[in-house]
Image (cartoon, rainbow, N blue to C red):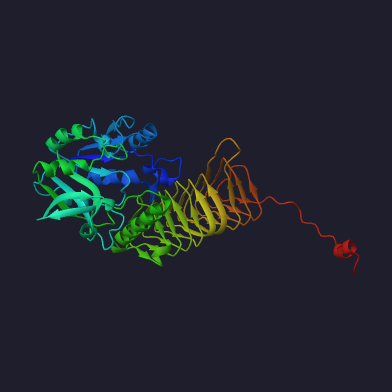
Amino acid sequence: MSISVVILAAGQGTRMKSSTPKVLHEISGKSMLFHAIDAAQKISDDITIVLYHQAERIQKEIEAHYNGVHFHMQDAVQFPGTGGAMKGVSVKHTKALILNGDMPLVTMQALESLMQGDADINMSVIKMDDPSGYGRVVIIEGNVHEIVEEKDCIPAQKEIQTVNAGVYCVKKELLDSYIPALNNDNAQAEYYLTDIVKMAVDEGKTVHPVIVKEEEFKGVNSKLDLAHAEEIMQRRIKTKWMKAGVSMRLPETIYIDSKATFEGECILENGVSIQGISHIIASHIKTNSVIEDSHIQNSHVGPMGRIRPDTKLIDTHIGNFVEVKKSTLTGVKAGHLAYIGDASIDEGTNIGAGMITCNYDGKNKYQTVIGKNVFIGSDTQIVAPVTIADDVIIAAGTTVNKDVAKGSLVISRTEMKTVKNFFYKFFGTK
């Protein structure tokens, strides 16, 4: 890896209208900055992230997920702007790729295209059918001649369809020379990174335009941009997994986290949401079910099932309106209307409708252990901590608050009473 990467993530992002830093807004379960870091790590061992606004919060988030990333704090008071962000940045390799932290859709392949050749600067360029509102990149004889802001364009220049995508691959020697020489002699009194292009052209250096896809270099500046980027990312994720053999019914209605993985022949019906670090193996997830940070293997979930974090289902059927949290179920059937939390349940066990594990006393969570071939009747409460051995029958309506021995029947009910003709006496009718 002979290239350094600098990711600019210092901006305030006021158009997001949020107390959360712009670059920490999530796309498919991962902060948009993390998507950029992931792409960068595939091509470089020297990554520097430039921070300023809420720098401490962003750095803490990055350090919780990545090792070996360098940080540089922009002096935005004295040196505002993208050029100011680069002042004082030191890179390891002979070339540096400069990209933005609000470009979550950039790919390794797109970045590699900017690394090719021996130009002094490779500059990302998008060709647009309608370039209105963008500065034009003037290309003469295959090289960039200048960047002209739209307000400064003469009529002929307004016809140019090439615009700046904002990512550059620059030789280290040029950065070391040009960045200290940047000035803020402009209407905004900011230091612009684009000025290094003019410096290079003026000195006869080679500035090569690299045509890139608009989708991959799309910046996210608002909640609307965030939603559009999410749609693109979801399309990529689902395309990848369908090509790998996952069946999806109405895929546009399905959500899959970027960290989720699949193995074997899986089926996802419409409205399914696969969140977090979930791993699905040869399973069928039915309509409107939610899986969160769980392992599902050779099982059926739903419709309208909810599998909460730290759950492991193996050879298990979870039906409609069943919720499972932090539990391991092997060879279990829970057909409908149940809550199973902090439990371990073994094969052959049947969970009746309305069964709940009472796992929380207001302060602490407690474990329920249920053995093999246990039949649990409807409307049963299992008050943890409790262990139910193999081959047990628990009658409907029972509250279990003590351990149960193998082979037992457990039943706790008040005696049923019948008062004849009470209806007529109460309502005064015959």
Question: Quick check: can you spot residue 86?
Answer: yes
Residue 202 horizontal/vertical position (percent): 12, 42
Residue projecting furthest to the front: 154
- Looking at this view, is 101 or 83 the one in front? 83
- Tell me the quarter of the image containing the N terminus: top left
Number of callouts in the render? 0
In percent of the image, x 19 and y 31: which residue is there? Answer: 180
Question: Quick check: can you spot residue 111?
Answer: no
Q: Is residue 141 above or below residue 9?
A: below
Residue 281 horizontal/vertical position (percent): 36, 57
- Tell me the quarter of the image containing the C terminus: bottom right
In percent of the image, x 77 and y 56: which residue is there? Answer: 416
Q: Is residue 239 above or below residue 403?
A: below
Quarter assignment of residue 42: top left
Residue 258 horizontal/vertical position (percent): 35, 51
Left or right, 348 with reference to 138: right
- Looking at this view, is 378 or 173 the one in front? 173
In percent of the image, x 34 and y 55: which residue is there? Answer: 233
Residue 421 horizontal/vertical position (percent): 87, 65
Quarter assignment of residue 173: top left
Left or right, 46 with reference to 31: left
